[in-house]
Image (spheres, rainbow, N blue to C red):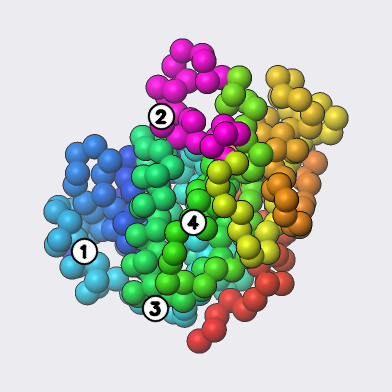
Amino acid sequence: MDNFVVWDYTKRFQNWADIRIRAGWRVQSHTSHGTFRVLDGLGRVVLTGEAEPCLAWFAASAPQWENDRVVLMLHSLAGSPTLLKTLESRLNTAGYQTANVAYPNLFKGMDDHLRQVAALMEAMAKDGIRHVSFIGHSYGGLLIRALWAVPLPLSRGPVVFFGTPNGGSSLARMLRHIPGYKAFFGPASADVLAGAVTTLPVPDTPVLVVAGGLGRYGFNPLLKGDNDGIVTVAETRLPLLAHAFRYLPGGFHRYLPKSKRGITAALAHLAAMGPRSST
């Protein structure tokens, strides 16, 4: 237990999937070689090996949640939890518990991600969590929408989408026939197309959509209308649902969750919709 190994949480591509999270500690499984590990709240590896001993050690040694509410955070495609760390730190300072989830987004598709996160939430419920709010960046927002099709033993609170292509990604539609596109982005490359997105449920809780752009033409000249370089402002809108909306002038897609204005808007939305703790 004295020989801690520091895990580089800033790695962009996720080979590890969180299968348990409790008060910042986590158990992860590796996408390809099937090993497991336990990380402490600072991201240090404290145990590696088979699933059973890692899960047993975690159950006995990881700290308990301080209350029964958590904000579940899901990162973008080709991203990682590090892109949400600034926002997570602000949430923690404001008194929110967080679960900033790692999932192997370049190696699996929506169905696999959905099973992983749903199982993670069920385990959180067994550990005492009763109420979950959500923050999703880009693809992470689509995964949040997919969770609405799954019955879970948790009440669901407000949702914040940062640059999520709720109307489908026209950029993905343009790039999908380019050699190497699907090979790089994996099965999830099809999940952002309009045909797949329109089948996803729409949350029935209060939603805030945060979008970025430059004005009339946006960052990316290949996209029609204002855009954040990856997603158009129009594509971030949820169809057939009245929702709060915040536009960030100069907001580039990758950094929307790090924007001070975006973070302020997310905190205000969560605070307006309920308490941080019910215990």
Residue 243 image position (x, y, % from top left): 74, 57
Report which quarter residue 20 is drawn in. Answer: bottom left
Instruction: Compare marks 3 and 2 and give the one earlier in the sequence.
Output: 3
Residue 104 in view, yes or no: yes
Instruction: Compare marks 3 and 1 and give the one earlier in the sequence.
Output: 1
Give the residue furthest to the top: 179
Q: Tell me the distance, in whole angstroms, between the alpha carbons under discs 1 and 4.
A: 27 Å
Numbered tag placed on residue 271 in the rendering: none
Front tag of 3 and 1: 3
Read off the residue under disc 2.
186
Within 10 Å of disc 3 (Cα), the crowding (few <14, some 14-19, many 20+) is some
Residue 252 in view, yes or no: no
Instruction: Compare marks 3 and 4 and give the one earlier in the sequence.
Output: 3
Give the prevailing secondary structure in the magenta stretch. helix
Read off the residue under disc 4.
149
Q: Tell me the distance, in whole angstroms, between the alpha carbons under discs 3 and 1.
A: 17 Å
Instruction: Compare marks 1 and 2 and give the one earlier in the sequence.
Output: 1
Residue flagged by tag 3: what amino acid is it? Gly
**Residue drawn at x 47%, y 80% as measured from the top left:** 67
Q: Secondary structure at mark 4?
A: loop
Which residue is more in the foreground, 261 or 224?
224
Q: Tell me the distance, in whole angstroms, between the alpha carbons under discs 1 and 2.
A: 29 Å
Q: Which residues are magenta?
A: 175-197
Q: Secondary structure at mark 1?
A: helix
Front tag of 1 and 2: 2
**Residue drawn at x 41%, y 32% as measured from the top left:** 187
Read off the residue under disc 3.
128
Within 10 Å of disc 4 (Cα), the crowding (few <14, some 14-19, many 20+) is few
Numbered tag placed on residue 55 in the rendering: 1
